[in-house]
Amino acid sequence: MSEAVSPPPATTDRWKAWDSFLEATPDTGFMQTSWWADFRTTVGFGHFGAILKDKNGIVGGAVVQKFSYSSQNCLYYIQDGPVLPRDEFVAGEVFRAILENIEARRKAENETVSHLRIEPRWQRLPSFVSGFRPIPPLTDIYLEARDTRCIDLRPSEAAILAQMKTKGRYNIRVAQRHGVTVVEDASDQGVADFQKIYDVMATRQGIRAKPPEYFQTLVSLLSSLHQGSVFFAEYQGLRLAGAVVVYFGRRATYFFGASLESHRHVMAPYLLHFEIMRRAKALGHEWYDLWGVAPEHEPDHPWSSISTFKRKFGGLEVNLVPTLDYVYDPTAYDAYLRHNKRS
């Protein structure tokens, strides 16, 4: 039986071993890394580890975030996890051990833990998972996208272009003919430029924008660890579109993006993404994750427009299991649901 490792500080060799394990494990996500957990502390999330190992090393586990959403209540949140072995029988054992470790932690809390939320990178629900309730997308402010689109970067550039929709390829060529260029700029000025474009887009779309310190901290962290960068599409000296990209394992992920309404005819965002794909491929990444799409046959979905744009790049639709909640305290959980609905 695997044993739980007590949660170490993020600077210890044990966390480094966990991050190395994640990098070497296919289909894991960057939101399970110690550096992402450290970043989340800047927006109010604590964390602890429930990491399982046997005589040969780490076999699975989870970085569990803790968020206190009221003076007396908190939730536990596992983004991109838990991370389990491929063998389903062993995975079930590891999953149960993780839950036991989390339960011991819960019993020692001074606050009431309303629920455990997990967002694993599973495309089907394993038979050993029970007692969790699925959470519909966009109903809660603490949810990540569960459906995405991924571009296979392993073929040649010509093949990557060929699998796109005709309009996607055409718009890339339009941008090239207009002289649009793509630059990488993760400097303080680059972050400030991205924030300007992002704020304009947020106002246009009526969404709540992240504050400047969010991107300043995130990009600084990604740059220092060589885990991501910021890219811009420029036209006649103007930065028309930008993207924050995260590199992790086999994937490069389009994490945040924004574009201006001006000069739309030059199709700057199309070339932006194609060039990001080319650079990610050159770095050895195998997939470009477009990070969230609406279901294809829901034209009234809030993400419908951006999803139509993303689908023009082709790729494969990846549908993960819904966000799952395990309720510890029904009264506290009901209060959580009332106060954390997405407006």
Image (spheres, grey):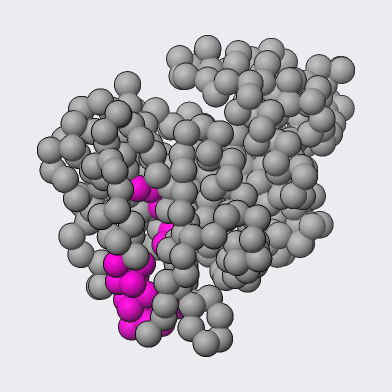
As drawn, which residue projects farthest toward the left? 331
Determine the residue positioned at 42% across, 72% down: 4
Residue 127: in magenta span = no
User: In the image, is residue 170 above or below residue 189?
Assistant: below
Q: Nearer the viewer, residue 25 or 151?
A: 25
Residue 297 placement (x, y as % from top left): 35, 40
- Is 106 on the left-hand or right-hand side of 274? left
As drawn, which residue projects farthest toward the bottom? 55
Residue 142 placement (x, y as % from top left): 38, 37
Q: Quadrant of residue 177?
A: top right
Determine the residue positioned at 30% across, 29% down: 70
Residue 124 placement (x, y as % from top left): 33, 65
User: In the image, is residue 190 above or below residue 2?
Assistant: above
Determine the residue positioned at 27% across, 36% down: 73
Any part of residue 58 in sight: yes
Q: Quadrant of residue 160?
A: bottom right
Boundaries of the magenta span: 76-100
State how many labels appear.
Answer: 0
- Is 158 on the left-hand or right-hand side of 288? right
Residue 292 placement (x, y as % from top left): 48, 42
Quarter holding the N terminus is bottom left
Determine the residue positioned at 29% across, 67% down: 100
Any part of residue 267 in sight: no
Q: Nearer the viewer, residue 327 or 127?
A: 327
Quarter holding the C terminus is top left
Q: Nearer the viewer, residue 25 or 309?
A: 25
- Is 38 on the left-hand or right-hand side of 262? left
User: In the image, is residue 150 above or below residue 256?
Assistant: below
